[in-house]
Amino acid sequence: MELIHTVAWMKQVAADARRSDRLLGLVPTMGALHEGHLSLVREAQRQCSPVVVSIFVNPKQFGPSEDFQKYPRTLEADAATLDNLGVDYVFAPPPEEIYPPGFRTAVTVEGLSDRLEGRSRPGHFRGVTTVVLKLFEIVQPRFAFFGRKDAQQARIIRQMTGDLDLGTEIVVCPIVREPDGLALSSRNAYLSASDRRAATVLYRSLAGVRREIAAGERDVVHLLASVRKMIEAEPGVSLDYAEVVDADSLDPVIALRKTCCVLLAARVGSTRLIDNALIEPAGDSFNVTI
Ligand code: AMP
């Protein structure tokens, strides 16, 4: 495995791979790797060669009062893990490689970026799309792999790649969870023992939605009332939002009809966590994927 720190070298390596007609796959991450990230890497390796994993804690996607400084940085361990997996290249640039002095450009996907996570974290998705566009320009991957854990992010990135004809296919991979249902996240490391127990309420509330839909419930107001009640009853957990939105437009829906998502964000202790479930029509019923 080769560890690359500069944009110039990464471009060179990626250009060589493209010239030899190989299917280059990119897995963008902020490091502190866990099984969720590794599932994307394995999927990338199934579909592509070579595989590039980027590790970059992107300052532009953190708000002024967010956890940029304390975000876990474990590059050495991450590189060893990726080496063991047989990853070809790890791209881990310092911030000034991506944002040299005088950097002024941003890219925004209008409409999809200012609701849900975007409402709670102003500027977050502008930071995400700016860095992802830049990574795509440097690496020019044929495929890029993202987790459904960040469902709104995946939707926004797919919009950007289509709108800008980037030629990269976006692959969205399933959510990897702990045995008790908590979605893996680098931020889970912040949870105290009691926060960690409480945090499963996000998964439990989504499992409740799945049960109610299986029992015939179709009324979104009712489904959301159950979710809110369960989360608000959990000590130490404060709900930021719980919404059912159309998977394509991210507009709120009132009745289940097309493919939609339940999107949740909550603060558990001082840690902000997100989770979601996908609701897809299946004949007369719906499949709920958590
Ligand atoms: P991050 O390092 O948090 O920016 O995440 C990098 C990528 O890993 C994103 O595409 C995330 O959606 C994905 N990811 C994070 N956690 C999980 C998880 N539990 N399951 C699947 N993918 C995940």
Image: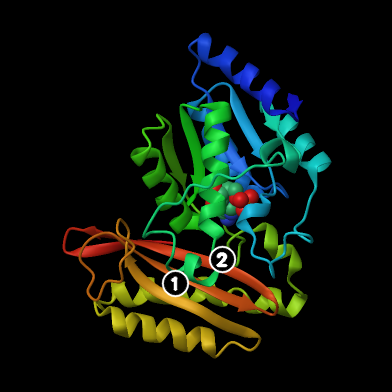
Viewer-proximal residue among 227 and 76:
76
Residue 189 x, y percent position in the rendering: 74, 63
The residue under label 1 is: 207
Residue 86 x, y percent position in the rendering: 68, 27
Residue density around tag 1, few if under 14, some if 14–19, many if 20 or more, within 10 Å: some
The residue under label 2 is: 181
Q: Does the CB distance between marks 1 and 2 fall below 8 Å?
A: yes
Q: CA distance from mark 1 to mark 2?
A: 9 Å
171 shown above or below 266: above
Residue kind at label 1, given as amino acid type = Ala
Q: Residue furthest top?
A: 20
Q: Name the residue rendered at 55%, 67% in the picture.
A: 121
Q: Name the residue rendered at 59%, 73% in the picture.
A: 200
On whether ligand 1 comes within 8 Å of the CB at mark 2, the answer is: no
Residue kind at label 2, given as amino acid type = Gly
Ranked by sequence position, the earlier of labels 1 and 2 is: 2
41 shown above or below 197: above
Viewer-proximal residue among 83 and 136:
136
